[in-house]
Amino acid sequence: MFKKVWKWKWIITALLCFLLVNILPSSFIEQRYSKGFFLVIRKFFDHTLGKLPFPCYYLFAGLMLFLIINWILHFFTEKPQPLTQRLFRVLSFFGFMTTLFFILWGFNYGRIPIEDKLNLNIQPLTEDQLVKETKTTVDHLFEIRRKIQRDTNSMPEIVFINNIEENSKRALNNSLKSFSYDTSNVRGRFLFEDAFLVLNIGGQYLPYVGEGNVDDAVFYSKKPFYLIHEMSHGNGFTEEADCNFLAYAACIGSGNLSLQYSGELNYLLYLLPEIRIRDKDLYISVLSELPPVVRKDLMELKRYYEKHTFKTGFLGEAINNIYLKIMGVQGGTKNYDKMILLIYAWKNSSTK
């Protein structure tokens, strides 16, 4: 009997992990896992793989490729097992990887929501509030840009990428401290161009190696925000909107002009589509009132991404949407848009 149960161990533990993250109280997970065991995991990664001079994503991808090739070779060189046995072995492997995923990071999905922790009053924005917030963001973006580049020429890339990892980490840790969260030395690395964008994904946090990764083809003025977003995942925040919010708060509070510009730019790129969804005529009106240099920056961004948009992009969107919904994130990929509500509530609270 024990042998039969033992064969199913990884499938059972994976299902148990899903069950626990949904039934354990958020306060228990916050204290015992997010502020307890996970910090041990975080320190382990920071002092081991985090010391390597190259993205550990490559190590993980290489290991997975080796296992797949080895399995294929075994399939053709050895006497094949019955189909049910082969499927069971694959399922067991997925069970093992799922269990490891939860141990290393995934239980953070059950922690106390950031809006509860910060006592943010999340409410839908009226059309007037949305337009006013957009105009305020545009004004701030224009001011920051004028300090970086006095004329209308494109801003130099070096301003954004110089010492980007350290600047981003420092900004995030300062922001986390202000919100009474723990900090870390999580790494933020850049992978080769279009590694993620081919699936319409700008970055990814990989729990198995404990580092955040961003596609090097992400436009340079967006990179700091993207990097801090992935580093936020590395600090135990699972929801996309939460990481967008933390990235914005870190950028704006950093005192670094390039980070501030990146934060406001990415925020604006969420605000404008929200206006377009509500009222296309209003959207056109708001665009027409943009300062010429801001409109120029947005057009430059649009032209750039036309060269880095692929027909396979829908696959990444679909996979990410399914993954988020499986993990209990309401709205799937639409969760990213919740950042507007979080930021607006934060700006209008005493927490800021």
Image (spheres, helix red, strand yellow):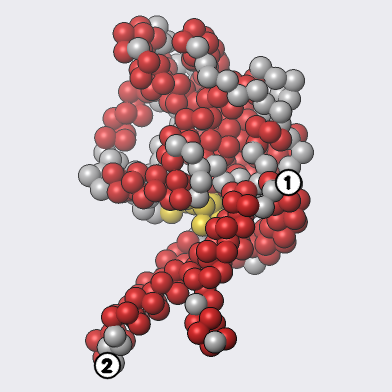
Residue 109 vertical position relative to residue 276 in the rendered view, above or below: below
In this rendered view, identify the residue nearer to me: 269 or 86: 86
Residue pictured at 53% horizontal, 35% vertical? 241
Residue at disc 1, secondary structure: helix
Lower position in the chain sequence, tag 2 or tag 1: 1
Q: Is residue 307 left or right of residue 3?
A: left
Residue 286 vertical position relative to residue 80 in the rendered view, above or below: above
For the question of whether residue 279 can be seen, the reply is yes
Q: Is residue 55 left or right of residue 304?
A: right
Residue pictured at 57% horizontal, 39% vertical? 243
> Which numbered disc covers residue 27?
1
For the question of whether residue 142 can be seen, the reply is no
The quarter of the rendered structure image containing the N terminus is: bottom right
Residue 182 vertical position relative to residue 245 in the rendered view, above or below: below
Look at mark 2 in the image and give the residue it sits on. 79
Separation of marks 2 and 1 at Cα, in angstroms: 51 Å
Q: Nearer the viewer, mark 2 or mark 1?
A: 1
The three-letter amino acid code for the residue at tag 1 is Ser
Residue pictured at 58% horizontal, 37% vertical? 242
The three-letter amino acid code for the residue at tag 2 is Lys
Mark 1 crowdedness (10 Å alpha carbons): few <14, some 14-19, many ≥20: few
> Which numbered disc covers residue 352?
none
**x then y, percent, for residue 286:** 39, 9
Q: Is residue 302 left or right of residue 220?
A: left
Residue at disc 2, secondary structure: loop
